[in-house]
Amino acid sequence: MSKLVIVGTVAFDAIETPFGKTDKILGGAATFIGLAASQFNVDASVVSIVGGDFPQEYLDLLSEKNIDISGVEIVKEGKTFFWSGKYHNDMNSRDTLVTELNVLADFNPKVPEAYQDASIVMLGNLHPSVQMSVLNQMTNKPKLAILDTMNFWMDSALPELKEVISKVDVITINDEEARQLTGEYSLVVAARRIHDMGPKYVVIKKGEHGALLFHDDNVFYAPALPLEEVFDPTGAGDTFAGGFAGYLAKTNDVSFENMKSAVIFGSTLASFCVEKFGTERMIGLKHNEVHRRLKQFKDLTQFEIELT
Amino acid sequence: MSKLVIVGTVAFDAIETPFGKTDKILGGAATFIGLAASQFNVDASVVSIVGGDFPQEYLDLLSEKNIDISGVEIVKEGKTFFWSGKYHNDMNSRDTLVTELNVLADFNPKVPEAYQDASIVMLGNLHPSVQMSVLNQMTNKPKLAILDTMNFWMDSALPELKEVISKVDVITINDEEARQLTGEYSLVVAARRIHDMGPKYVVIKKGEHGALLFHDDNVFYAPALPLEEVFDPTGAGDTFAGGFAGYLAKTNDVSFENMKSAVIFGSTLASFCVEKFGTERMIGLKHNEVHRRLKQFKDLTQFEIELT
């Protein structure tokens, strides 16, 4: 098993979907990543920042999942990052209603000393300078640095984003963002351009259409489980990344073959995440449920054709 | 091996894509289906109609692929069905520029006597009454009747379409059309509604996102091969259906397990179809190329995770 460092937001979300709406609930990229990674009982530390308004029970919840929270700074007089969004009827697009950076505006991440030698670093969606700061605090070059990002940073901090992209081994990015970053419509060509920017492995997330893993001339495809109903997509991408990073940390094997399994685990965990609001489904998720669903992924994708 | 009857258009297409444009070239649903099925050296007959303007060399081309064309009626004084379309830059949408029904307006299909006992019937995209007429000419109930259709018939001939849907075992339909037919956004729910209309097997085609095969509570997913470039999508759906039907005819096994392989063959052949204009790639396609690409599909989708 490898130590895993996760940086990202720990936040409040308020979500509206065609199925209902929530008040402020637990959210944030690092929260979803941490909850997904905790399925593998890995030695993980979350680096983040919250305000004095953040309930202790939410922090306890992460601790109970064996996630180290000594790297979560609490700014007593500050307020926690808050995001609010409303999903359209097709669940594939959303409007951001509110973004209050609050304590995140001055976030200066501090990786706990005990985790500065972690071999896997998961840089969740945040300002690329914050992601870079975490990388720079690692005393040994990590075995694998994984970066998640979004279009917002392409629009507002492209040079810093390109800098941190050049330093990581894996990037996870959605299809539209891969196109925006490269100006290429074909995802195969876009992946090659991103590869040229630094990452040896490129994961392109396609939401309900699954995810593609690219490495040199190799491609692997993990579908999303076809669901009767997507209740709330919030956190699905982070959960995917957390499952991916958590599985690699647990197995301590960063070969392409093992990354295939990591992508399948990411898809599997994401398929749970969308079944309830926010983190609700992930918090109660049991190992045997995950195993049953992995079996479904096998049935969904595995076939026998004799090649002569 | 089972006999296969294919009904559909044999036509002229004129295509414009961002990569170029063609004059009138060989096209039509039955042409693409037949060319795909011919990869399996099956005993197939195409039932269609053309005008006196249709080149003998195009008919010879089908004959050379061992496709029986005795069911292709030639109306000497008539003109062949002509379709012209222009693809948008994303290649996922197109405008129809010209549709000239010509001889197709009065098409009264006649299944050759030698094929009226065929065990597999592939009803390519055509007016549902024409599809029904072919079904009614079969002397034995076919082992498997497969229907392909499109939104045009939902708008213009819904009662006839529902009638023929109720008589077939398999339907192949694209995602937007499945949603239109059922009023359900979720493809899982849409497939169940279509199942309730008659077909035991529902194949939902998602273009560059692959295809889903539903049967009772079972789902199988075949991805599309990620391509650097889609040159011309014309005929890809028909090629998929032809690969599916051809493989089932060759193996004479209509179990769900074997249909998984049929879907993979359909996807594999469709991945070639889009590489050149019209039928060009399919006409020259060699067995060893298909085998190599099947290997790519295995690499793309197969993974090893021990389930404990």
Image (spheres, coloured by chain):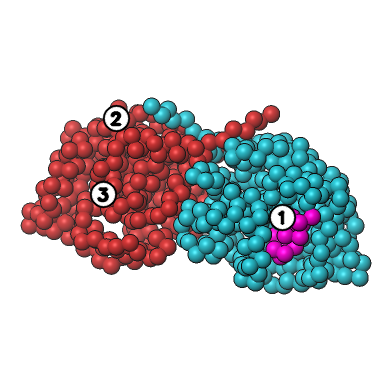
Chain colours: A cyan, B red
Image quarter for residue A16?
bottom right
Q: Are marks 1 and 3 on the same chain?
A: no
- How busy is the neighbourhood of tag 2: few (under 14 within 10 Å), some, or many (20 plus)? some
Give the spatial CA distance, label 2 vs label 3. Answer: 27 Å
Of the 4 image quadrants, the one containing the N terminus of chain A is top right
Image coords of residue B280 (percent x, y): 26, 49
Q: Residue at x 69, y 72 (%)?
A: A97
**Residue B239 at x, y = what percent?**
33, 46
Q: Which residue is mark 1?
A: A123
Circle nearer the viewer, 1 or 3: 1
Residue carrying label 2: B2
Mark 2 is on which residue type? Ser
Residue B171's x, y, as percent? 40, 45
> In the displayed structure, would residue A18 be above or below residue B126?
below
Q: Which residues are magenta?
A: A125-137
Q: Relative to residue A35, is residue B192 drawn left or right?
A: left
Residue that lies at the very extreme toward the front in this rendered image: A140
